[in-house]
Amino acid sequence: MSEFTANYRLPLRGSRRDWLNFDAGVESQDRTRPQSDLFEIGMRRVLERSDDWTRTEMLSWRREKFTIADQEDEDSELLMPA
């Protein structure tokens, strides 16, 4: 299994309590069969509130290409808002 991820945090309005977070990653698993390659990219907005709560809004997109047994390569995509 091989994996690489990257993350970048961008403060909003010069604040330490409000920021955007950008994520990207790739992962490859080769166990002869099954085999899969995964790519994911996402963005989160995080706001630390004064009442000790944290609000997080996010959107993430994930694409996976995989092979199981003797089947041809299959693709799946997932879009996750939260």
Image (cartoon, rainbow, N blue to C red):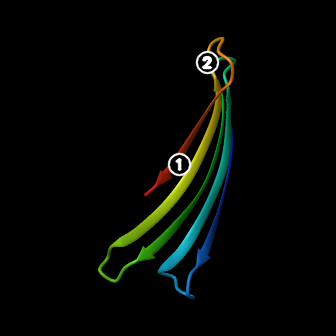
Q: In the rendered view, would you say 21 is above or below 81? A: below
In the picture, measured across the screen, residue 19 lies left or right of residue 64, that is left
Measuring 62% from the left and 13% from the top, which residue is drawn there? 69
Image quadrant for the N terminus? top right
Q: In x, y percent, where is residue 31?
A: 66, 21
> Quarter-wise, where is residue 53 in the image?
bottom left
The three-letter amino acid code for the residue at tag 1 is Leu
Q: In x, y percent, where is residue 78?
A: 54, 43
In the picture, measured across the screen, residue 36 lies left or right of residue 49, that is right
Q: Nearer the viewer, residue 42 or 81?
A: 81
Question: Residue extending furthest bottom?
Answer: 14
Measuring 52% from the left and 65% from the top, which residue is drawn there? 44
Q: In the rendered view, would you say 32 is above or below 52? A: above
The three-letter amino acid code for the residue at tag 2 is Ile
Q: In x, y percent, where is residue 35?
A: 66, 24
Q: What residue is disc 2 on?
A: 68
Measuring 54% from the left and 76% from the top, which residue is drawn there? 19
Q: In x, y percent, where is residue 5?
A: 66, 52
* Secondary-structure class at tag 2: loop
Q: Badge 1: how crowded within 10 Å, few (<14), some, or many (20+)?
A: few
* Secondary-structure class at tag 1: strand
Q: What residue is disc 1 on?
A: 79
Image quadrant for the C terminus? bottom left
Question: Residue extending furthest left?
Answer: 51
* Dot placed on the residue nearer the N-terminal end, 1 or 2: 2
Q: CA distance from mark 1 to mark 2?
A: 23 Å
* Badge count: 2
